[in-house]
Image (cartoon, rainbow, N blue to C red):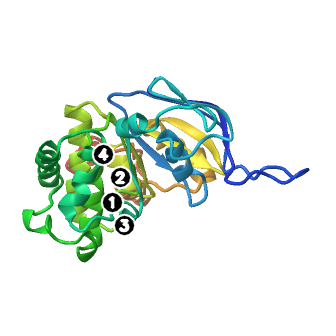
Amino acid sequence: MAINFQKVNFAYYAPKKNQQANFVLKDIDLNIEERDEFIAIVGHTGSGKSTLVQLMNALLFATNGKVNILGTLISKKSNIKLKPIRKKVGLVFQFPEYQLFEETVIKDIIFGPKNFGMTSQEALTRAKEVAKMVGLDEDILEKSPFAISGGQMRKVAISGILASNPDILILDEPTVGLDPFGKKELLSLLKKINEEEHKTIIIITHDMEVVSDVARRVIVMDDARIVYDGDKKELFTREDILMEHNLDYPELMKLMIEIKEKLNIDIDIHQYSIKDAYSELYRVLGESHE
């Protein structure tokens, strides 16, 4: 397992004497493979999602329990080098401005690979490759990262992590601030990286359309705990879990539910593309309702 959590609890502040710790993560057991996983972490604000992924990147350390990342046991007390961990497990924050600090976009993208040992020329070549990959125009590269749009800043932050070629890529709300075209472009890129380079991709998202489109495995968090960890398609058949944890269906499934109720027909609402939804409706209705 690339990432392994065993009975992990985390609190931001140590409790005072005779007080109970205010854990924001409780009894987390989790296994994530190094290759070929595409995981969406969902749950409402305050459920522990961002804290969870920061433990995966060794930005935070478990209060108790065991965290093992790519064969290294991570502990605040252990004398381990964290730079190799953070090279292999790249994290893109929800707010890209937290990761941007250089004078120009290109310098920001170059910073990571140079910090992890690439020469200046290697880093520049790699930076230009990933900038093109994520859809950044060349004329943006010499601009200040704080003089571009929010969507472009997000692409710069993603480029800076991709330039270091991590084994596992974690993104916190990657589609926030992107227009529909930019969102589709980014998700297509992540799918390509996952399918062609076999990298594990982990995304935090509130957008169930994103879950429906790209994820294969879903981790649902609520009240600091993992309450579901499994196949995406199974999750959308579990109305009890969706209702209990206030999760929504993707828009296409909502439409299928509406059609099912309005026409009083027995159809499978669990469709993930317009083509599949049409096939299901045609199977039940034939040509009578075209």
Mark toward the viewer: 4 or 3 = 4
Instruction: Kindly identify the amino acid type of the residue bearing the numbered disc 1.
Output: Thr
User: Can residue 290 be spotted in the picture?
Assistant: no
Instruction: Kindly identify the amino acid type of the residue bearing the numbered disc 2.
Output: Val
The residue wearing badge 2 is 210
Mark 2 and 1 residues: CB-CB less than 8 Å, in contact?
yes
Residue shown at the point (65%, 48%) measured from the top left = 224
Q: Quadrant of residue 251?
A: bottom left
Q: CA distance from mark 2 to mark 1?
A: 8 Å
Instruction: Kindly identify the amino acid type of the residue bearing the numbered disc 3.
Output: Glu
* Dot 1: element: loop
The residue wearing badge 1 is 175
Mark number for residue 115? Answer: 4
Q: CA distance from mark 1 to mark 3?
A: 15 Å
How far from the left and from the top, in percent, is residue 231? 45, 34
Q: Residues within 10 Å of mark 3 (few under 14, many from 20)?
A: some
Mark 4 and 1 residues: CB-CB less than 8 Å, in contact?
no
Nearest to N terminus: mark 4 or mark 3? 3
The residue wearing badge 3 is 97
